Image (cartoon, rainbow, N blue to C red):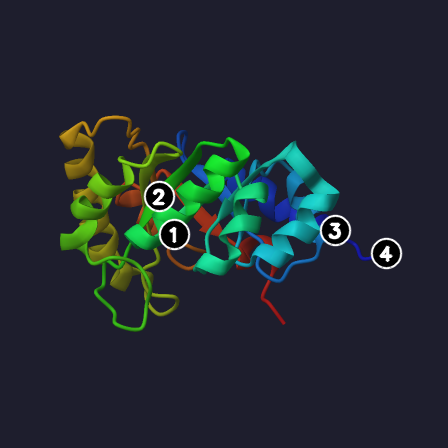
Amino acid sequence: MENLDYIKENVRQLLQELPPGVELVAAAKQQTPEKILAAVEAGVKIIGENYVQEAVAAFQIIGHRVSWSYIGHLQKNKVKKAVEVFDQIETVDSVELAEEINKRCQVIGKIMPVLIEVNSGREQQKFGVFPEKVEELARAIIQFPNLKLSGLMTMGPFEGNPEEARPYFRETKRIFDYLRGLNLPGAEIKILSMGMTNSYRVAIEEGASRVRIGTKIFGPRL
């Protein structure tokens, strides 16, 4: 049996470090259910998954002990299964995807909290909507009865100097504040999900209320 104490220690250190009001999402991409369970036992309350199939396998072992947040690019053909497992979807980047999530949630009688994924760096190879399109998508999402608009998420650069991510986080926070000021009916804009292992400290300085951390919890992926 693999010794997973290092995971528990990593989680404890992170939870002590994070300021009040900042949620920790354990980004569990390609991690075994046993490793995810170790993180949960150490105090993780939200598991973030990039792949629906992996989430289903982990969910069968861990179940509703935690909240499940989808943090990967969601394909429309995976939505039906995703809405059964996940408590939240952080990566809505089109009206078509929002429509599909709404439709599938109607079938099972579920209201799904969603975040809009913002491509704050306007990088062609990344998913997410460009900053100038966020309001338009937000206004579309609030028309769907089975969705609840809960905030924004952004990726920022994956590696490199964390300071390089700061302008992207700042831009996303600016849009977040603007959206909140619109008082959109039915929306509850309270989650700003940004920052990963290499950039979460900068993200928190720029106003993140949620950070998605994998490597610093589970170690480097093989």
Kindly check if marks 2 and 3 are in contact, taking CB atoms under 8 A apart as contact. no
In this view, the mark in front (3 or 4): 3
Q: Earlier in the sequence, mark 1 or mark 2?
A: 1
Mark pair 2, 4: CA separation: 38 Å
Helix, strand or loop status at disc 3:
helix
Q: Earlier in the sequence, mark 2 or mark 3?
A: 3
Seen from the viewer's position, the closer of residues 181 and 216 is 181
In this view, the mark in front (3 or 1): 1
Q: 188 left or right of 220?
A: left
Q: Which mark is residue 91?
A: 1
Q: Decide: few, some or many residues near mark 3? Use Cα within 10 Å; few <14, some 14-19, many ≥20.
A: some
Seen from the viewer's position, the closer of residues 186 and 18 is 186
The residue beneath circle 4 is 1
Q: 15 left or right of 134?
A: right
The residue beneath circle 3 is 34
Helix, strand or loop status at disc 2:
strand
Q: Which mark is residue 115?
A: 2
Badge 1 amino acid: Thr
Badge 4 amino acid: Met
Mark pair 1, 2: CA separation: 6 Å
Kindly check if marks 1 and 2 are in contact, taking CB atoms under 8 A apart as contact. yes
Q: Position of residue 200 (x, y in %)?
A: 39, 51
Mark pair 3, 4: CA separation: 10 Å
